[in-house]
Image: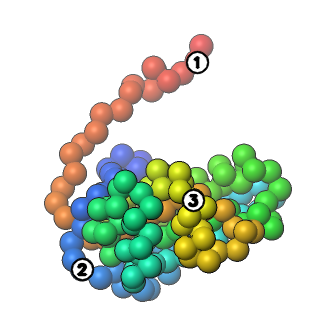
Amino acid sequence: MNILSLIKSRRSIRKFKKKPVDPEIINLILESGRWAPSGLNNQPWKFMVLSDDRKEAVSKYTKYFSIIHEADKIILIFLDKNVSYNYEKDLMAIGACIQNMLLYIHENGLGACWLGEILNRRKDVQSFLNVSDDLELEAVIALGYPLGIVKKRERKFYEELIIK
């Protein structure tokens, strides 16, 4: 699939089959994320992959608990404050990292949902996971094999987005 078709066909998946995702695919998803651009090539991200009881416990920190519960695995993405040089630029780099992973996931027949609402309870999640204060939770990706087809979403025409 060419990249524009891949971008246009990717959707947030919220329901998953009860089918495990191969650990090698998870490694390749993380590999795709680590190749995202970052200012000064500081690569300000750290990852945590959960598929066990801790995944279920993390689901309790968001109103979208069912998405995490249904997913085979979740990937938590953290900002590594030890390598951060500019908070805003590093957050943009983490966004690029997440987009790389979402596109890789989609290209390989999996589905994912980028969860941000959980950040309202980021400190609780980090405390539960016993994560260092040097790391700051920035997103959670729930992933697995999609259950069903997701409807096509409309987008604004690009002419509406151009400032003249």
Whether residue 35 is visible to the viewer of this picture, yes or no, is no
Tag 1 secondary structure: loop
Where is 155 relative to 41, above or below? above
Disc 2 target residue = 19
**Which of the two marks, 2 or 1, is nearer to us in this view?**
2
Specify whether 65 is left or right of 135. left
**Which of the two marks, 1 or 3, is nearer to us in this view?**
3
Specify whether 138 is left or right of 44. left
- Which mark, by number, is residue 103? none
Q: Distance between the residues labelled 2 and 3?
A: 28 Å
Tag 3 secondary structure: helix
**Which of the two marks, 2 or 3, is nearer to us in this view?**
3
Residue lying at the far bottom in this picture: please name it. Answer: 23
Classify mark 2: residues with Cα within 10 Å, few (<14), some (14-19) or many (20+): few
Three-letter amino acid code of the residue under disc 3: Arg
Quarter assignment of residue 149: bottom left
Classify mark 3: residues with Cα within 10 Å, few (<14), some (14-19) or many (20+): some
Residue 31, position as x, y percentages in the image: 56, 74
Q: How far apart are marks 1 and 3 (CA)?
A: 35 Å
Where is 87 relative to 157, above or below? below
Disc 1 target residue = 163
Q: Do the residues labelled 1 and 3 touch (CB within 8 Å)?
A: no
Residue 110, position as x, y percentages in the image: 32, 68
Please name whichever residue, 128 or 19, is drawn nearer the observer in this view of the structure.
Answer: 128
Tag 2 secondary structure: loop
Specify whether 61 is left or right of 77. left
Classify mark 1: residues with Cα within 10 Å, few (<14), some (14-19) or many (20+): few
Residue at point 76%, 63% (across, down): 81
Please name whichever residue, 65 or 99, is drawn nearer the observer in this view of the structure.
Answer: 65
Residue lying at the far top in this picture: please name it. Answer: 164
